[in-house]
Every structure is written in C-alpha cells, then in structure tokens.
Amino acid sequence: MAEPVEGALPRSSAGFSWAGFPWAEFAACLVFVAAFAIPSFTRSQLIYSIANQALVGVVAALSVWIMLRMNLLTFATPAFMAIGGYSVAILAPMGVTDAFALTAISFVVPALLALPLGALVLRLRGTYFVLVTYVLSEILQLILFMTPDLTGGSNGISGIPAVTFLGTELVSNRAVLKMACAIGLVACLITAGVTRYFRQHFAAIEENEILAESLGLVIWRYKVIGFVVAAGVAGLAGFSLVNMLLTAHPSSFSSGSAVDFIAYTIIGGRASILGPVVGTGLLVWATNLFGTQGQLAQGMYGVLILAVVLAAKGGITGSIATLFRRVRGAN
Amino acid sequence: MAGDELRVEGLAKRFGGLRVFHDINFRLPPGEILGVIGPNGAGKTTLINVISGRIQPSSGQVFLGGRNITGQPSHALSRLGVGRSFQQTNTFRSASVRENISRAIRFSRRSGSAVGLDLLLRDFQLTDRMNEQSDKLPYGLQKMLGLAMAYAIGPQVLLLDEPAAGLERGERSRIDGFVAHVREHGGCGVLIVEHDMDLIRRLCPRILVLDAGYVLADGPPAEVLARPDVIKAYLGAGDEDEV
Amino acid sequence: MEQFSQAMIIGVSLGAQYALLALGFTLIFGILGVVNFSHGGFYMLGGYVAYSCVYHLGLPYPLAVLAAVFATGALGYLFELVLLERVIDDHLSTLMLTLGLYLIVSTAVLLIFGPVSPEFPFPVSGAWRAGPIYVPLENLVVLAVCVCAIAGLYALLFSTDLGRGLRALADDRDVAMAQGMRPKLLFPLAFALATGLAGLTGALVTPILSLSPSVGDPVLATSFLTVILGGLGSLGGAALAAFVVGIVEAYTSVYFGGSVGALVLFILVLVILVFRPTGLLGREIRGA
C-alpha cells in the first residue's frame, strides 16, 4: 500500500548513483580481507600477536558499534563474548571442531540469550539498558566462578582441541591468525548487512526516537534486533579469543574490558563502520607500542574519550572526513 | 478519504501529586478544525501527548471512529491514523527531505493520498529541495516538513502542537494553506494547539479554552473569546504571544 | 537466631553505605540527568585520600574522612563546572565524560599507589555485645555516620532553600528555571554534594572492606542495582532499595556464602523490571 505514495514522491534524477554505494562497509570488509595477507609478509610473532588482539578487539568493537547506531551504550560485550567463547570451549572437546559449526554456534547461542533480556530491558528508557548491561558483565563473572562443573570455575577450560577447517587442523600461528581474519570478515559482513538493511530505522532511532515512534516505528523491536545481532557478533569475538588462547578463562572476559571496546569505537568514530575498525587498530597498536599495558592503557583511553566528546565529536574517522571535506571545499 | 471522529471522554492526567488536566470532554468530527488555547502550563501539550499515546492518561478514554484507543502506545496509534506534529521543529535532522517523508510513510505503514502529498510538497516549495538535508532548510521550511510528515501517514485525525510557534508573521499563512489542504484532500479532523489568536480566529470555527487543567469554555471563537472569565484567564494575562 | 540478628545488623550497616552511594547517584541523575559512571571512582578516591591523610600527613582519622569529603566534592564541582557543563544536554556525551573521568582517576591512583592494597585498618576495633548478639564496633561507627549523613542530606533537601531548588530542578527543569532557579549555579553544587557523599562512603568503608584502584567497579554495579530497584530518579526509592540490597547481601552471604547475593539481586531486579518498571517507589517522570 505504501509503495504508490513513495513512488509519487518527485524524483531527483533517474539512474544509478555512486553516492548510495556503501563505501565505508566495503572498505571495512577489505581491511579484513587484506589481513589474510599478513602471514605472507612476516613471520614476526609480535606482529601475529598484535594482529590477533586487534582482530578480536575489532569484532567486539563492532558489537558496541551496532548498539551505538541507536544511541545505546552497551557494557555487556564481555558477557556475550564469554558466552560465545565458552560455548566453543565446552563443545570442542566433545568433538565439534568444525570451523563453520563453531562460528555458527558462537553467534547463535549469545544471540538467543540476548533475546529475552533485550525484550525486557529495551522497552524501558535507554538508561536502564546501560545500567543493566553493566551489571550483566559483572554478574557473568560470578556465574563463571559458580559453575565449575560446566565452565571450569576459576581455572577455566584449557586444552581445547584445535579448530578444523574442511578436515585440516588449524594449529600453526599462521592458521590461527587466518581463522581470526575469517571470523572478523564474517562479523564485519553481518554488522554491515544488518546496519545497512535497517539503516533508515536505526538512523531514525538515533536522531529522534520520539518522532520515529509518533510516525509508527516500533522502537523497541528494532533495538532488540540490534541487541541480538550485537550479542552474536560479540560471541564471534569470544570464539576468536578462545581460538587464539586455546583456553577459556574468566579473566579473558573481565567486565573492565567492556570499557576498552567502547573506547575503540568512540575514539575511532561512531558515524561509520570504519570507526571501530580504525579505532581498534590504532589503539591496540599504540598500547603495544608504548608498552602501556592494562590499566595504564585505560588512562590513555580516558583522556582520548574526553578529547573526542569535548573537541572532536566524530572521533578519528569523523575528523578525517571533516578535514577531507574542508580541503575539497577550499579547492 | 474521510477521517474518523475523535472522541475524548473524562480524560485526566496527573504527575505524582500534580494535576495537569482534569475531566476533558470533546468530539472532533472528520473535517472539523478545533482550536485549543490556554495559558502556558494549562496542559495543552500534555493533552496532545496523551491523545497520541506518548503518555498514559490517569483516567478517561479516547475513541477514534468509535474504537477505544485509550492507552495504546504512540506507534500503534500512528498506524491507526493518529497523526501529530511537535512544537519544536521535528524532523530527522541529518536525513534528506525525501528520506524524512519516506520514513513517515514506511514507519506508519499507511498510505494517504499520493496526489495530496505531492501537491502539499509543492505548496510548501519542498519539491525542489527533496535532496537537501533537512536541518539545512530554513526554520520555517523545517516546520512545514514536520507538518508534511504528519500528513504523509494519511491521518484519520491530526494533532498540531503550536504549528505557528517560531514562524515569521509572513510565514504563518502557510498554516492556513496546510489546513485548507487537509480539508480538501484529507477530510480528517484537525486539533490545533496555538498561541497565535489571529490564526485561531481565522482557522477554527470552534475552540476549547483550557485553564489550570479544566475546560473553561467551548464554542465559537467570537463567543468564547468575549467571555470575561476567558479574558481574565488567558488574554488578560498579558501573554506576549498575542503581540 | 544469633546468626539471624547479626546478619540483620550487618545488612543494615551495608544498607546505610549503599544508601549514601545510591542517594548521590540519584541526585546526579535526577537533577542533571547524568548517569555518573565515575561514582565508584569517587568512592575509591575517598578511600585513598583518607589513607594518604592518615599515613602520609599524620592526620587523625576523623579529619582524614573530612578531607576525603572535601577533596572528592571539590573534584566533582570542578569536573561538572569545567567539563560536564559543556555537553550537559547530550545524554550519551555526559555518560562518556564520566566514564573517561573514571578511567583517568583510577589510572592516576594506580600510578601513584600501585596495584597492591595498602594497609589501612579502621582505627576503632572491638565489639559490642548484647547477650548472644555480637557486632563489631567499626560497623556501628560506620552505621552511625551514614545515618547522620543521610539525615543531614534529607534535612538539606527538604528544609532549606537550596534543597527546594535542587528538588525543583529534578522535578521539572523548565518549570524550575521559569521560577528563577539557576542550573548553572546549582548543577556543580549538586554534583559536588553527590561525589562528596561517595568520597565519605569510601573513606569510611574501605578500611573495613578493602582498598585498591579497582574497588570502584563492584561499587558502581551495586549502585546501579540499587537505583533500578528503587526506581530511577527516586530519592526515597534509592534509600529503601539500598537497605533491601544490604540486607539481601548480608543474609545470602551468611546462609549461602560469598557471591550469590549479587546474582540473587540481579535476578530480583530483572523480575522487578518485568512487573514494575518504575522500581519500588519510582513514579512517572514528566516530559520526554
């Protein structure tokens, strides 16, 4: 019914326009494809390690970014990472080692668990969502410690068998890194797909929830869709992390790491999918470069977050885009 | 396309101990234009918020075309044909004019008169600016876009919250054009909350005066605005919007 | 029976601490509309300021507690005035600023004091006995100070002009401004008041529980549970919920051991959100 009316809107110009092409999404996917080439250039264990960290971090940051599309800040990323990672760690010793099966499981299990929680919390004001996700990642740590039979408690699960790809075991560092690239690419495609498909809905919620609702948009439904996908993407990050370490341990999913993923996304820039990709890459690299580990890195993130909020709203990618536009405007 | 009658019965709203309005009753048949006036804080915007489902009423009922729609959320009401505009400019700021309109159509899953919408956009001189970002438009045009979006859902009844607020004197005649257009192409009832008394006199054959949450008067403007209690409550308050 | 009444006293004492934190958090959320992620950080900072005053400046403990209140209050005041004020109407930006501040403060403390918990015992020891009931004196002191602070806060909010102004701003900012309230003056004060309370709690409680740079995280999570339970933005609800949280924690730790309490509370909060989204005492808030 709606089509004829939309069809009646005056058209500007007929034909294909490059302006509508999803450049940012395309570029983000290219980054993951390019990462496959890292093992061909270097055998440096340090670079492998940094690349692996960054690939896990990017996927987690993409999960944060999906919710930021709708102005929602999530602290639950480590919780859903843990659910995805532990699902893999529990199932792999039972013989489920196929890369495709484990990727699917690490996405679906957290996504299904996010559904009822999202349906409950996302009907309320956004503030409830922030608070509940924060508490959730604290609570999940407790649950891990309280269920030693299932999750190994404070020891975690170690000695996880290697993932197999079409029957071949992925044991070498190079193979593990390529697996991380593949998981990253899958996560990026899912994120790009969902945020492009619901672009109008997410943008409407981000810009003006009240107006969108008054026009008939069922806000909480789209927030729940976003949350479920974000949880699945976080689960993929958990899989990638467990695959890298070959253990699942509570400390890998500490609630404090939620802040890191938020920092990657905000500092990278929240306007496009390139933000979390660029932000994670730069911050993980910088953290390793300056040898500032753990808590000290968080201090740096704190300063950068203040800088972004107060001075450079668009983060790194947003500021570059503004600069680019200004230079082009001057010519 | 004809609209549905809006009927409000014994509607009341309290926030905590604070009574915003109390026992509001009126009917708004299709094609009629009803003005709602009253001093600031009389509960006019809250009335629109309650009817359009933004806020739950404390008691009372709202009917649309005989169907009880009390307490339904605003997205559901939009899909039933309750269209509304907002006091502040309300568009999706970074979206183009075209995207704004098409979101209204898509989200409401309703179809109004395509010809009517097209003509309205022409009237508002938005046709040539369909690809412009909405917050780059002049303020007046942003407000018109907001009205066009409320119209685009093909409303059974339209609730306009201070459509003329912030507009230049000269731009206010566009509201007249909009209401005339709705009459011609929509035929739905229109409720207008407004401070501009000239506009109310021009457009509304009937007005409702709210004061401190009560209906002080209900009738034709000439009659109602001559009543001493109305003058005392509203016009006598030295409202700067009148000047 | 002894265990039961003892757990009750511990619970009430915990509840009083949580109340101070939750009231501050609620003040900031209610008046400024800001979700303060640095609240746990101010608690932690209060502990470290008190510790430094006692062990580096040689001040007596009560003076150290006062110093902690003023230091955290002053930092809160400056932070609101200089940084938060610039983006006060943007919900997400304010949240991120407080998060950034928390990261900076906890990193600074880590750099200065190191990751190891310092030795910081409570200056009063011993216990109070009444028949079979046995209560550590330190808990009683903390309880007494917290109750006084809560009473003082209520007196300030409900019987002074400043308090009336603050509450008016929390109820409806537009109306309050129309009546001549000045958010520019009152916002930093409200923020300072709340962070000062968090600092007070930290200075009082960290000697009994523990002091480390990461002690703010669980405190923040508990504050969140408390304010959701009580109804976001409701002062009375926050105080009531704080005692519920304290008592549930005390009983679960006595009867089921350590960390079950937090899980029980989380589930309780989710159930509350299903059946009563406005919390125990929350009411509908006017406006958007």
Image (spheres, rainbow, N blue to C red):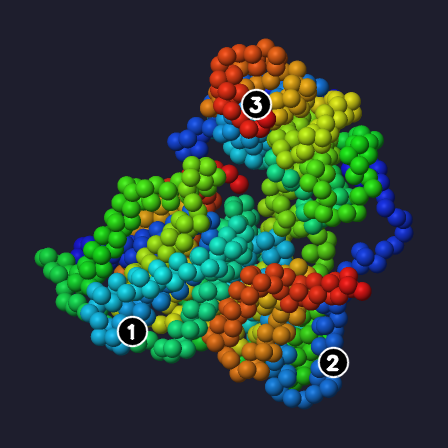
> Can you tell which of label 1 and label 2 is closer to the viewer?
1
Residue on which the image places disc 3: B37
Task: Using the image, determine if residue C236 lies above or below residue B172.
Answer: below
Q: Of all residues shown, which one is farthest toward the left?
A: C131
> Can you tell which of label 2 and label 3 is closer to the viewer?
3
User: Mark 2 and mark 1 in contact (Cβ < 8 Å)?
Assistant: no
Mark number, residue B30 = none
Q: Residue at x 64, y 28 (%)?
A: B159
- Please indicate whether residue C203 sits to the left or right of residue A215 in the image: left
Q: Of all residues shown, which one is farthest toward the front?
A: B243
Distance from label 2 to label 3 (Cα)? Answer: 69 Å
Front residue of this view, candidates A101 and C161: C161
Q: Residue at x 63, y 35 (%)?
A: B166
Q: Chain of mark 1?
A: C
Q: Amino acid at mark 3?
A: Ile
Q: Quadrant of the N terminus of chain A?
A: top right
